[in-house]
Image: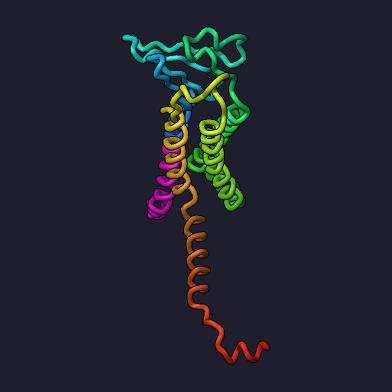
Amino acid sequence: MPGSVTSVETSPQILTYVFSVFGLVTSLMLTTVGYANNAWIVLTSAQDLGELQRGIRGHDCYRNITSDDDNLQCLPWELEDKTSKFPRPFNGIVPPSDSICWSQYIALIIFLCQFAWLAYSIAQCCSSKAADYLQKYRLKLYRLYIATLWLFAILFFFIVYSLHFNDFYKMNDSIFEKNYGNGMKIFLFGGLTSMIIAFIFLFKDELKDDWNKSSFCCLRRRHQPLPTRNDETEMH
């Protein structure tokens, strides 16, 4: 029957977009949890049984790891004389660097992109008119999604730069041990992995085309004949 044939033909495509929606929702959940978790760069000191957490949501937090309730004290970046409210030696922490501030903006742009791609996937699932209209721009959308993935790499670069090249203390940074926190790992690695899975489902045809083109170019280079002596003499 015609109706049943149509449903059989379109169901794999619908499942593809359903899986992409699931991947994007998972990515959005992980990035939200990672953003809210202030442990992006964690400073610990042998002089104090606690840790200072510097995230990208505009706060510095002190956590007493020996306390039974494991309480977290957070203060906004713009608060005057903020660091004096933290116990020693964390009372000498300097304000966040430009790279940390830029990381906050990049993370917010990633959130906007995630919402946009989620809307795109839902439109593909629920509206045939939207799917037909967006089909004309698939190649451009494919490249835009790749640019979105690169934002994660740029954000990771800023965090790595902040950890290794920025000063955190007014006097001497050597009293601290600096590490990457769980917030950064959840946002970058969890969020990025889920977005890549959604990307594979959304643009599998474009990925196949790019793979075939790159494979064809590699094969052509590999099988290209080397110039002989006669060819070299003719050239001269």
Rendering coords of residue 93 (x, y %): 54, 17
Nearer the observer, 233 or 171:
171
Please name the residue shown 52% across and 82% down the image.
Answer: 225
Residue 4 magenta? yes
Please name the residue shown 66% across and 87% down the image.
Answer: 235
Rendering coords of residue 17 (x, y %): 45, 44
Nearer the observer, 218 or 120:
218
Residue 198 sits in which quadrant? Answer: top left
Rendering coords of residue 57 (x, y %): 54, 22
Nearer the observer, 219 or 161:
161
Q: Is residue 16 left or right of residue 55?
A: left
Please name the residue shown 44% across and 48% down the image.
Answer: 201
Residue 120 magenta? no
Quadrant location, the N terminus: bottom left
Q: Is residue 84 visible?
A: yes
Please name the residue shown 47% across and 35% down the image.
Answer: 188
Nearer the observer, 165 or 140:
165
Question: What stretch of residues is rendered in magenta?
Answer: 1-24
Majority secondary structure in the magenta region? helix
Quadrant location, the C terminus: bottom right
